[in-house]
Amino acid sequence: MTLSGKRALITGSFQGIGLGIATSLAAEGAAIVLHGLADEATIAKAEKAVMAAGAAKVESYVSDLRDVAATEALIAKVLANGPVDILCNNAGIQHTATIEDMPREKWNDIIAINLTSFFDTMRLLLPHMKERGYGRVINTASVHGLVASAAKAPYVSAKHGVIGLTKVAALEYASIGSRDSGGVTINAICPGWVETALIEPQIQARVDLHNGDRAAGIADLLSEKQPSRRMSTPEEIGAVAVFLCSRAAHNITGAAIPVDGGWTAQ
C-alpha cells in the first residue's frame, strides 16, 4: 500500500468524482477525510465505500465552502485530528445559461465553490506540507479549464482559474523537499465526460433514443466533444490521483492533465 501512513482530505467527496478519488486513495492505505454537503444516508454510504476500499481510517465533515470562516473552521478541525498530507480540491457546482441570462448569484456561488475554496484550503494547508517536505495538492479542474463551451461562463472561468492557481502554487513550492521526502507538488486533473449520478439524466435521455442501448446512448452524447466516445469512471480519475501522490511523481508539478478522450486534442 503506497499511501500507508498518509492522510488525505478530499472536498466534495460524498459522491461522484470525489468519492472515486477517496476510494482510490483508500485502496492504497491512506486515511481518508471526506467532506461535502449531504444527508446522513449519503454520508454513511460514502464512509462504507471508503472503508471497504481499504482506508486506514475515515472521517467526515459537513461545511459550506462559500463561507470563508466555515472553511477556516473546517481546516482547523481537520488539523486538530492530525496532519493532512494530501489535499484533493474537488467540490464543484454547475449552472448553465448564457451570459446575459446568468443570474449574478449563480456566478458568485460557482466562483466561490469552484475556485475560491481551492485557494482557501491551499493557503491553509500548504504551509504545513512545506514544514514536512511532503505534500500533494490535486485540484479537480476540468476539460473546461482548457477549452470553453457556451452557456457555462462561471464554470469555465472558475476552471481556467483553478489551472492558473495550480501553476502559481507549483512555482512557489517547487523547491520544497527532496526526491527522498517526495517534495510538495500541486497539479490539476482535467476530466472530460465522467460517468456520475450528476449526468445520469443526460445519459438516460440518449439511451431512450437508442432503444435502451446504454453504450450507444453514451456514444451519441459524447460524439460532439469527446472523440473516444467513452466516459471515464470516477475511479479512473482516482487512479491518476494515486500516481500523482507517489514519490515517483515528485517532479510532476504545475501540470494540467487531461483525461478527456481526445477532447482537447482537436
Image: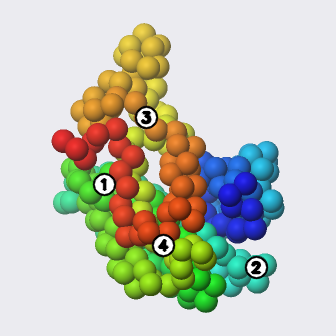
Identify the colour scheme used. rainbow
Tell which circle, 1 or 2, labels the residue nearer the N-terminal end: 2
Q: Quadrant of residue 263?
A: top left
User: Which element type, helix, strand or loop, lies under badge 2?
Assistant: loop
Quarter in which the N terminus is drawn: bottom right
Amino acid marked by disc 4 = Thr
Comes first in the chain, label 2 or label 3: 2
The quarter of the picture where the C terminus appears is: top left
Q: How crowded is mark 2: few (under 14 residues within 10 Å), some or many (20 or more)?
A: few
* Residue at which label 4 appears: 185
Could one spot residue 101 in this view of the protein?
no
Q: Nearer the observer, disc 4 or disc 3?
A: 4
| Circle 1: residue type | His
Residue at numbered disc 3: 231
Mark 1 vs mark 2: in front: 2
Tell me which residue sits at (66%, 66%) in the image: 8
- Of the two numbered discs 1 and 3 on the same chain, state the one appearing first in sequence: 1
Camera-side residue: 115 or 204? 115
Image location (x, y in percent) of residue 142:
37, 54
Residue at 23% across, 54% down: 147
Helix, strand or loop at mark 4: strand
Around disc 3, counting alpha carbons within 10 Å, would you say few (fewer than 14), some (14 to 19), or many (20 or more)?
many
Distance from the alpha carbon under mark 1 to that under mark 2: 34 Å
Q: Are marks 1 and 2 in contact (CB under 8 Å)?
A: no
**Nearest to N terminus: mark 4 or mark 3:** 4
Which residue is under mark 2? Answer: 82
